[in-house]
Image (cartoon, grey):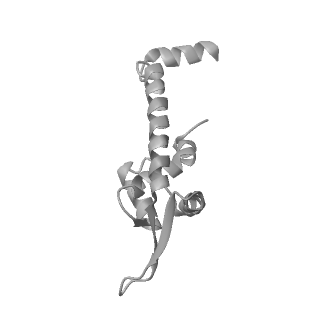
Amino acid sequence: MTNESDLLRGNTPTLVLAILSEGPQHGYAIAQQINKRTGDSLKFKQGTLYPVLHTLEREGWVSGEWRHVEGERPRLVYAITESGRAALAEKVRVWRRFSDAMNNLIGGVAGDDRIGDAHERTA
């Protein structure tokens, strides 16, 4: 059965690029922003984030830079690159097309009693 974590897994790079498109962030802040902006619907764990950031860095879509702020420990801050912005634009285009198609398909079905009835007939 598909759930939110399955959807998150496939779309994590898009979520990270979207957050970074608004400005540089360190890993913990990226995770917090995703959690906050999705109303905690997507429970985003830092352990998921860092492999994605490393992949995005290898792709050339983000770059990391160590920042040292007095009184705080050094943090690796990530910023989106121009090729990352182009990749994000393409991912958003694909997502919107998919989302529109799904909404067209199931938009009128959500909450419809016929779904449960159809399931009972096939079970």
The answer to whether residue 43 of the structure is visible from this angle is no
84 vs 50, nearest the viewer: 84
Q: Please, which residue is most extreme toward the right here? A: 123
The answer to which of 70 and 45 lies nearer the viewer is 70
Q: Give residue 85's position: percent from left, percent from top.
A: 44, 51
Residue at far bottom of view:
71
User: Which image quarter: residue 68?
Assistant: bottom left
Q: Quadrant of the N terminus?
A: top right
Q: Along the line of sight, which residue is nearer the eye, 4 or 85? A: 85
Residue ID at (58%, 16%): 120
Indicate left or right for 120 with 103 as reference: right
Left or right: 81 as drawn, with respect to 71: right
Residue 39 on image: x %, y %: 37, 49
Q: Residue lying at the far front in this picture: please name it.
A: 82
Q: Residue at x 52, y 63 (%)?
A: 46
Residue displayed at 50% across by 61% down: 62
Q: Quadrant of the C terminus?
A: top right
User: How many labels, in total?
Assistant: 0
Asked if residue 80 shows in the view, the reply is yes
Q: Is residue 41 above or below residue 72?
A: above
- Examine the rendered structure and indicate whether residue 29 appears above or below residue 121: below
Q: Which image quadrant is residue 56 in?
A: bottom right
Residue 94 picture location, percent across and down: 49, 35
Depth check, front residue: 30 or 62: 62
